[in-house]
Image: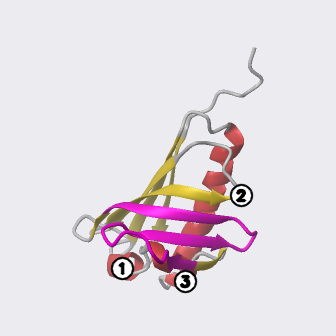
Amino acid sequence: MSSQIPTSTSLNETALIRAPLAKVWHHIKLQDFSNFWSALSKSEFVKGASPETDIVKWTFKDGQVLEVKQEEHSTINHYITYSVITSNPALSYSSVVSTIRCYAVTSGELEGSTFVEWTGNFSSDADAGVIEDGKYKRREALADLAKAAGQK
């Protein structure tokens, strides 16, 4: 009998940022995440990676280093999808694919704001602790993004 707690292996965090889409979208480049995300000390392109592949190294202030690969990017539909390809120290799960998608709020009281959605789809070996950690990291990053985009 397994002692693991069954859990969903996907998460979805959202935020309404009181800044125009163009100001928010400007920050959504893997190599620029350290410009807004306070948990990161550096984000930089990996030297020597294939010219057809965008791989960025994220160095977290706690010492974790991830290499993330841009899987998809659309400046028309305002989304980016990336996967973690290496981690030091090693992750406790096999894989994760994440997407950040931005939508302009075009009418109503919050017209001119941006709705941001950050999803994560983890491999089935990710436990509840991994999903919770991902949730709180995304919430922190979204709050940091709001500050960087000029939200009061």
Left or right: residue 104 compared with residue 32: left
Mark 2, secondary structure of its residue: loop
Left or right: residue 88 compared with residue 66: right
Q: Residue furthest top?
A: 1
Disc 3 and disc 1: Cα gap in Å? 18 Å
Image spot of residue 55 (x, y percent)? 45, 68
Which sits earlier in the primary sequence, circle 3 or circle 1? 1
Mark 1, secondary structure of its residue: loop
In the drawing, what numbered circle is on residue 20?
Answer: 1
Mark 3, secondary structure of its residue: helix
In the drawing, what numbered circle is on residue 35?
Answer: 3
Question: Which corner quadrant holds the C terminus?
Answer: bottom right
Question: Which corner quadrant holds the N terminus?
Answer: top right
Disc 2 and disc 3: Cα gap in Å? 23 Å
Image spot of residue 97 (x, y percent)? 46, 50
Residue annotated with mark 2: 89
Image spot of residue 76 (x, y percent)? 22, 68
User: Which portion, as a residue range, is magenta?
Assistant: 43-72
